[in-house]
Image: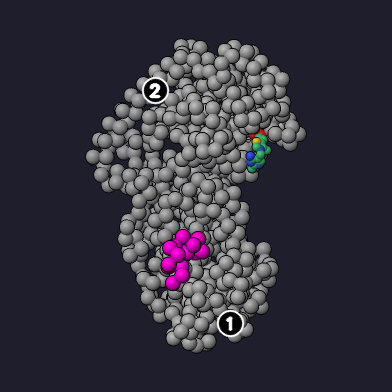
């Protein structure tokens, strides 16, 4: 079937592939950097994807039912830019010429929201595979939630292109196993199997049988010649047509750097080394001497194809309109998801806790997430095999699975890194609000994905519990000391460590209202009191402000004690023992506090008061900025101890007594 289609178009696709090769050679040559191997080796794959297989509309890059394409092997960014240009996205030839230049829309590696048609920020190998799994999960859930017997709003596919490097990374392996187990049959992975990595031939570092591996984790696998247009088209079409409960991998054998004989098939073909042979390569490919050449035939071919795509889009839009008019509730929910809007009064609608409520903030978090889940139907919440401890299970809802893709609880298994990358994929897709949970000490297992969420501005929420040496007997392996501060140094990540249940409510609302980046909620294992002698609204609002005066001094201000999370209790006790003139500032989120106006920050931490002490059960470094040279920080600049939590806290000096002592010594 696809053969016939290609018989008509294979000449156009071959021409386009050659010109895509030319664009990659010229762009990499122009900036003397970048990676040529994949754009050259995968040119036929690109031609088939953009010229035959994928459904998209360059005039509406955000079309809800478009096929999503993720270049996991982000170093091959010129592959994506060439094909986005050729296929008619708003990416001009000048932008291709500006590859890797300052402020261009063609940055070194693909960056989300910088370039129309780029679905994910990729480059750190393996992440894109996880993102694609997240996209596929989102697509499955969207189809299950929004399609009706009469109308299909979602039936798109998610296609990722990954190389040996991605396949070697653990994050991809975790995500691949999750996808197979979850039956994500809307996912197609193209494995650019060129037997070359960066330093050497791939055989130096790998020897597995890819087909057997994928088969063993529940995927359908096929191996093809990646330069045979018909083979590529058939494999992809059959993967699209065959929604059989299994994800598909097309293992495409390709020649890295094809088109530059001097380097093709070797590790030298991977980077920019081949660019110096540009002129001979252009000639060898049958391209004119003119650089950045695109023929009228290719332009016309894609213009015609875009006409067909526009027709598909128009048909879908009509279906959508009828569906929306017949299902206004679902349509409103979907539109809210796309707009990332949550109820303005979300925080007011989270029930207040009883004044004498004493619980770990992870427990309060469990109560709050269930209230939030009722008000934000787009919220999905996963855990890396720790729901029992992280308490973020949405009780009124079901589990996401192959047979129940509308479920909102995602059992990631003990795959923290994939959880991070999959949450990013869900957030990239933008229909649902992703959250994932594990112990704080394991945040480092998904840190590369958190970093990318910060970079790409994704509103993912992380629920990190067991947040200090207060976890106790499990000992130093499970006692984070550096982790909260380690997260705080990631740009565009808000790290909120609430002190009590009402700050937890405020933290959740802040996370949900935030659309421009991720939020990590840092929650205790051990119980903390409800600080109910202070107004609920003050504590809730305070979480969003990041820092606020919890207890105002009596008389003239003499000393400021600041703290976060479970240590706020100690700050309060110390203040009441120290008497007049002592202010307690709760600092649940340093990043949010830093974003407040100067006047607000000055009102909370007046420059006139330099007697300042901070206490937090973790490393002290970041607090010096707030206490100043005349202040003191009480913290833990060492690993923890194996003993009951209160004993460890006592032993390491995280107590009200210590605060009193330090303040008196100032
Ligand atoms: C996590 C991570 N580690 C290392 C790199 C550096 N790097 C970029 S490409 C590459 C080799 C990738 O090999 P392969 O996927 O086979 O790509 P190809 O050589 O086929 O282009 C490496 C090590 C990276 N981008 N990300």
Farthest residue, direction left:
325
Q: Nearer the viewer, residue 437 or 534?
A: 534
Inspect the magenta stretch and tell me whether residue 7 lies in it. Answer: no
Q: Quadrant of residue 334?
A: top left
Instruction: Check the image and report above or below for 142 versus 89.
Output: below
Quarter of the image where ligand 1 sits:
top right
Whether residue 33 is visible, yes or no, is yes
Residue at image position (48%, 11%) is: 7
For mark 2, give the secondary structure. Answer: helix
Instruction: For the C terminus, give its image quadrant.
Output: bottom right
Query: In the figure, is residue 595 to the left or right of 27?
Result: left
Among numbered discs 2 and 1, the one appearing first in the sequence: 2
For mark 1, give the secondary structure. Answer: helix
Location of residue 647 in the rendering, given as x and y in whole percent from the top left corner: 63, 78
Query: In the figure, is residue 188 to the left or right of 501?
Result: right
Location of residue 365 in the rendering, given as x and y in whole percent from the top left corner: 45, 64
Residue at image position (26%, 42%) is: 327
Location of residue 424 in the rendering, given as x and y in whole percent from the top left corner: 50, 46
Q: Residues within 10 Å of mark 2 (few under 14, many from 20)?
A: many
Residue at image position (64%, 27%) is: 37
Instruction: Check the image and report above or below for 132 versus 370.
Output: above
Numbered tag placed on residue 663 in the rendering: 1
Nearest to the eye among marks 2 and 1: give it. 1
Badge 1 residue CB within 8 Å of ligand 1:
no
Residue at image position (50%, 30%) is: 95
Question: Magenta residues, as a range?
Answer: 589-603
Location of residue 614 in the rendering, given as x and y in whole percent from the top left corner: 56, 73
Whether residue 504 is visible, yes or no, is no
Query: How far is disc 2 from disc 1 in space, using C-alphas?
Result: 70 Å
Residue to which mark 2 is pinned:
306
């Amino acid at each position: 079937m696809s053969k016939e289609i290609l018989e008509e178009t294979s000449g156009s696709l071959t021409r386009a592939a050659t010109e895509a090769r030319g664009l990659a050679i010229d762009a990499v040559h122009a900036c003397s950097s970048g990676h040529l191997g994949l754009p050259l080796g995968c040119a036929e794959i690109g031609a088939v994807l953009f010229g035959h297989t994928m459904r998209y509309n360059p005039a509406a890059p955000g079309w809800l039912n478009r096929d999503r394409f993720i270049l996991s092997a982000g170093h091959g960014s010129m592959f994506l830019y060439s094909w986005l240009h050729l296929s008619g996205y708003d990416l001009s030839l000048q932008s291709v010429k500006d590859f890797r230049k300052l402020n261009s829309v063609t940055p070194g590696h693909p960056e989300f929201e910088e370039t129309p048609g780029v679905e994910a920020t990729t480059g750190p190998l393996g992440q894109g595979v996880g993102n694609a799994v997240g996209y596929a999960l989102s697509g499955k859930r969207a189809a299950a939630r929004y399609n009706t017997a009469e109308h299909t709003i979602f039936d798109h596919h998610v296609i990722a292109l990954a190389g040996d490097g991605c396949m070697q990374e653990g994050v991809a392996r975790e995500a691949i196993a999750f996808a197979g187990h979850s039956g994500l049959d809307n996912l197609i992975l193209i494995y650019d199997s060129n037997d070359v990595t960066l330093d050497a031939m791939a055989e130096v570092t790998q020897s597995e049988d890819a087909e057997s591996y994928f088969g063993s984790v529940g995927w359908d696998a096929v191996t093809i010649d990646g330069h045979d247009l018909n083979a590529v088209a058939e494999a992809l079409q059959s993967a699209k047509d065959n929604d059989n409960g299994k994800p598909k991998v097309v293992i495409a054998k390709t020649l890295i750097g094809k088109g530059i004989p001097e380097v093709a098939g070797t590790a030298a073909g991977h980077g920019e080394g081949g660019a110096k042979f540009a002129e001979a390569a252009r000639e060898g490919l049958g391209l004119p001497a003119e650089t950045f050449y695109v023929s009228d035939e290719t332009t016309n071919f894609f213009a015609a194809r875009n006409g067909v795509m526009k027709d598909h889009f128009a048909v879908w839009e009509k279906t959508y309109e009828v569906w929306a008019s017949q299902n206004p509730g679902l349509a409103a929910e979907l539109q809210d998801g796309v707009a990332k809007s949550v109820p303005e009064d979300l925080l007011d609608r989270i029930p207040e806790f009883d004044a004498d409520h004493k619980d770990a903030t992870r427990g309060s978090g469990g109560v709050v997430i269930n209230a939030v889940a009722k008000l934000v139907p787009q919220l999905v919440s996963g855990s890396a095999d720790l729901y029992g401890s992280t308490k973020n299970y949405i009780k009124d809802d079901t589990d996401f699975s192959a047979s129940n893709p509308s479920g909102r609880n995602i059992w990631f298994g003990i795959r923290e890194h994939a959880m991070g990358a999959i949450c990013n994929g869900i957030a990239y897709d933008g229909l649902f609000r992703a959250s994932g949970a594990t112990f704080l000490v394991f945040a480092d297992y998904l840190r590369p994905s958190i970093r990318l969420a910060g970079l790409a501005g994704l509103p993912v929420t992380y629920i990190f519990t067991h947040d200090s040496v207060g976890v106790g007997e499990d000992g130093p392996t499970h006692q984070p000391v550096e982790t909260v501060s380690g997260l705080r140094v990631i740009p565009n990540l808000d790290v909120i460590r609430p002190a009590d249940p009402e700050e937890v409510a405020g933290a959740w609302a802040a996370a949900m209202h935030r659309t421009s980046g991720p939020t990590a909620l840092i929650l205790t294992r051990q119980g903390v009191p409800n600080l109910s002698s202070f107004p609920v609204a003050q504590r809730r609002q305070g979480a969003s402000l990041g820092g606020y005066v919890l207890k105002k001094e009596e008389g003239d201000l003499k000393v400021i004690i600041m703290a976060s999370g479970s240590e706020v209790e100690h700050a309060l006790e110390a203040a009441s023992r120290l008497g007049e003139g002592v202010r307690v500032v709760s600092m649940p989120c340093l990043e949010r506090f830093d974003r407040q106006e100067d006047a607000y920050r000055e009102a909370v931490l007046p420059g006139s008061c330099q007697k300042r002490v901070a206490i937090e059960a973790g490393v002290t470094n970041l607090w010096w900025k707030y206490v100043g040279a005349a202040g003191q920080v009480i913290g833990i600049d060492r690993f923890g101890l194996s003993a009951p939590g209160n004993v460890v806290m006592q032993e390491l000096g995280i107590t009200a007594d210590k605060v009193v002592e330090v303040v008196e010594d100032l």
